[in-house]
Image (cartoon, grey):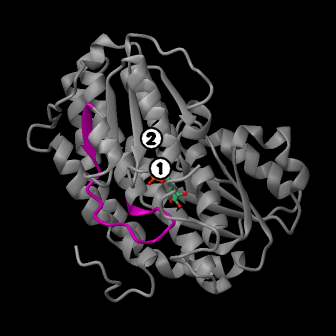
Amino acid sequence: YLVDKGNHRHFMEKEIHEQPEVISHTLAHYLDFTQGTSKPLDLPFNFADIDRLAVSACGTAYLAGLVGKYWFERHARLPVDIDVASEFRYREMPISRKSAAFFVSQSGETADTLASLRYCRKEGVPIGAIVNVRESTMARESDVVMPTLAGPEIGVASTKAFTCQLSVLAALTIRAASQRGTITAEEEKALVRSLSETPRYAAQVLKLDKQIEKVSRELASYKHVLYLGRDTNFPLAMEGALKLKEISYIHAEGYAAGELKHGPIALIDENMPVIVIAPHDRIFEKTVSNMQEVAARGGKIILITDQKGAAQATVKTLETIVLPDVPEFIAPIIYALPIQMLAYFTAVFMGTDVDQPRNLAKSVTVE
Ligand code: G6P
């Protein structure tokens, strides 16, 4: 990897565009696309022998872990306890002997995540680190290193590391499900096949840049933005809000769409755009009702969906960003891209320092 901006204005833009390639490298490390299976990892435990998985991380890496929780629980029937590391390290969680602990970190140096790792090490459970920097402290102190092959990430706001973390977690989910016997060989093949298509879909989404740039120009004129999503799109809603606030300094919140009624709906008016992340999945209709509630209060909706969703969402939107129809399993990886692009272009319109936003550090190695 050449660490320069190439033809891009910012490292963040370059890193967003590298995603098809780095996701593909990362997946190839964990999956055998010819056999349609997950590759054996050097894990110090078998997923069939544990009954809980503890996951801990900070910032964007935490949100990757949260998507992982939905995947592990749904496909591998493995309960996942997930925390931000700054809470995990102090809350004295009882850790069952029959569990393993995973730590997700781009840098492998984040102080709170490292402290959580050391806490689990003392508890005597097997430790896995999903890190982008292989020579990092977390990599050294864990029993197994599960690398993301994103290459150096320079932009402070994480983009390609996030989708590579998701790729590793998706591959691990397949491994766990296969060891635990919760999927058949045919189902394993189908999941692996769907992941193999991720780079191609990601490349298609990058081509929506002109439309996303246009919406971002509009977004840059607001002071507050609400992101909504259900299921794996809930962590993505939080990630969208995090990206936007980090680099454009626009106040943004990510909420589970079902929680709209329990608070944020009070804020909805024509000055509060609502970004809804809703592929046509098992709970799409529920999210459509949430959009109707927003529209009825004059809220402006930016809908990020797929072709099926766009055809079936009976609600007026300010803009609908239509992604290709993708298998549900890989949707979180694909939907990460438009939310990164929205934040990126909005920040460019705001004229902020996209790669080095104020007050933030790439790696938080102090408390
Ligand atoms: C900082 C960075 C974020 C990152 C978080 C966790 O806040 O600005 O982009 O997600 O730290 O960092 P890590 O290196 O542990 O993934």
| CA gap, disc 2 and disc 1 | 6 Å
Label 1 neighbourhood size at 10 Å, few (<14), some (14-19), many (20+)? many
Residue placed at 86% from the left, 43% from the top? 263
Q: Quadrant of residue 345?
A: bottom right
Three-letter code, disc 1:
Thr
Question: Is residue 289 found left or right of 231 in the rendered image?
Answer: right
Cβ–Cβ below 8 Å for labels 2 and 1? yes
Residue 336 coordinates in the image, percent (x, y): 48, 57
Q: Is mark 1 within 8 Å of ligand 1?
A: yes
Residue 151 coordinates in the image, percent (x, y): 28, 64
Q: Which residue is mark 2?
A: 114
Q: Which of 334 and 141 lies nearest the eye of the viewer?
A: 141
Magenta stretch bounds: 143-160
Residue placed at 74% from the left, 44% from the top? 289
Magenta stretch: includes residue 204: no
Q: Quadrant of residue 319?
A: bottom right
Is 103 drawn above or below residue 211 in the view shown?
above
Label 2 neighbourhood size at 10 Å, few (<14), some (14-19), many (20+)? many
Q: Which of 132 and 330 lies nearest the eye of the viewer?
A: 132
> What is the secondary structure assignment of the residue under circle 2?
helix
Residue 253 in view here: yes
Residue 294 coordinates in the image, percent (x, y): 81, 54
Residue 67 in view here: no
The disc at residue 110 is 1
Residue placed at 59% from the left, 37% from the top? 283
Q: Quadrant of residue 356?
A: bottom right
Give the main secondary structure, helix, strand or loop, of the magenta stretch.
loop
Is 177 drawn above or below residue 281 in the view shown?
above
Three-letter code, disc 2:
Leu
Residue 354 coordinates in the image, percent (x, y): 55, 78
Magenta stretch: includes residue 147: yes
Q: Identify the image quadrant of the N terminus.
A: bottom left
